[in-house]
Amino acid sequence: MEIDQEPQLQKSDNKIMLNSDINIIMVTTTTQQPQQHPRFKNYIWWFRVSLYIIFLLAGQSSSLLLERLYYDKGGNSKWMISFVQSAGFPLLLPLIFYFKPHAKFDNNKTKYFTLYIGFGILLTGVYLMYSYGLQYLPLSTFSLICSTELAFNALFSYFLNSQKFTALIFNSVFLLTMSTSLLAVDSISDQDSSTDLRKENYILGFLFTLCACATFSLYLALVQFSFEKIIKRQTFSAILDMQFYPSFFATCACVIGLFASGEWKILDKEKKEFVNGKVSYIMTLLCCCVTWQICYIGMLGLVFEVSSLFANIIGSLVLPLVSTLSVLFFHDKIDGVKSIALMLAIWGFLSYIYQHYLDDKKAKVEDHCLEVSRGEIEVIPSLLN
C-alpha cells in the first residue's frame, strides 16, 4: 500500500484536520466569532458597582449622622432607633413590582423562609447593639471601632466564602486590631473619673459596638454564601428579596422589643421634649428609614456583584468621612491617641486595597493567557488507522 505524499484536508464546521502517515494531528480553529472587548463587556457591571458604592457611602454616612442627631437632641429609645434601620422596607415594593411585574408566586420562597427569618433575627441583634454603641460613644470613636468589621469579615470570609488569607490581609487585621485596642484604652481615660456610671456606659458602648461589628460581618459572609450556594439567582430581584424579607422580620422583632421593654411609653414624651421640635423628631426618624434602605441596597448589591469583603472595604471608607463630620457638627474631640488609631485604621484599609489590586492584576493576566491559548495550535498525539 502506497503512502500518499501529500496530506488530505478534511473540512469540518470549525476545524481542519491534517491526515498523514505521521501520528500527529494538527487542530486549528478556522473561524472565530467576533468577540467584544472585555472592557466594553464590563461597562454595565462597573456602572452597577459604582452605583452601589454611592448608595452605600451616602446612605451609611447620612444614617449615622441622623441617629447621632436623634440622641443628641433628646432621643433615648434604643428600640426605636433599631426599628428605623429596617422599617423602611415598604419603600422597596415599587422596585419589587417593577422588576417582577408578571412573576408568579415562587415556590422556592417557602424554602427560603427559614433563611430570611434567621437573617431578620440576626439583624435585630445587630441593630440593637449598634444603637447602644451609638448612644454611649462619641460618633468619631464609634466610627473608628466599626473599622474592625473588615477584620472580622476577612476571618468569616476565609471559612465561609473561601477567601484567601494572605500576608497583606493578615497585616490589615493586625493593624485594625491595634487601632481598636488603642481606642479601648483611650475610651476609659477620656471620661471624667468622678462619673463612674458614664465610664461604665462608655465601656459598654465599646463592647456592644465591637460585638455588633463581628455579628454584622458574619451576616454579610452568610449572605454571600446564600447568594452563591442557596439562592443562585443572578438577578436584581434576588437583592431586593434579601433586603425586603429579613427587614420585615427584623421590623416585627423590633416592634415586639419596643413594647416588651416598655420604651413605647416614653415615645410621646420624647417627641415633645425633642430639642428641635416634634416635626424635626418625626423627620429625623423618617429620614433614617430612607437612608438605611439606600445603604443596604448598596451593601447587598456589592455582596452580590463582588463579595462581602469588598462591601466591607467600601463601608470602611465612611469612617474618615463620618469622623470628620462628627467633629464639625457634634464637636467630638479627636486627641493624639484617636489620631494614631485613625492612621492605623487607614493603613490597614490600604493594606487590603493593595491586596485587592494584586488579585485583580493576577486575574487579568490569567484571562489574557487564556484568550491567547484559545488561538494557538494544539498538537494531539494520535495513531492513524
Image (cartoon, grey):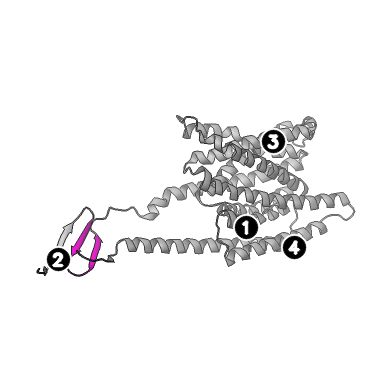
Q: Residue at x 47, y 33 (%)?
A: 100
The type of residue carrying mark 1 is Leu
Pointer 4: residues within 10 angstroms few (<14), some, or many (20+)?
Answer: some
The type of residue carrying mark 3 is Ala
Kindly indicate whether the residue at mark 1 contacts the one at mark 2 (C-beta within 8 angstroms).
Answer: no
Q: Residue 253 carries which label?
A: 3
Kindly indicate whether the residue at mark 3 contacts the one at mark 4 (C-beta within 8 angstroms).
Answer: no
Q: Residue beneath label 4, please?
A: 337
Along the polypeptide, which appears first: circle 2 or circle 3?
2
Q: Is the magenta stretch mostly helix, strand or loop?
A: strand
Magenta stretch bounds: 15-28
* Mark closer to the observer (2, 1): 2
How far apart marks 3 and 1 lie (CA) works out to 28 Å
Q: What element carries label 3?
A: helix
Q: Residue 81, how many percent across, how many down? A: 71, 39
Q: Residue 164, how many percent across, how many down? A: 55, 61
- Left or right? Give the position of 6 relative to 137: left
Kindly indicate whether the residue at mark 3 contacts the one at mark 2 (C-beta within 8 angstroms).
Answer: no
* Mark closer to the observer (1, 4): 1
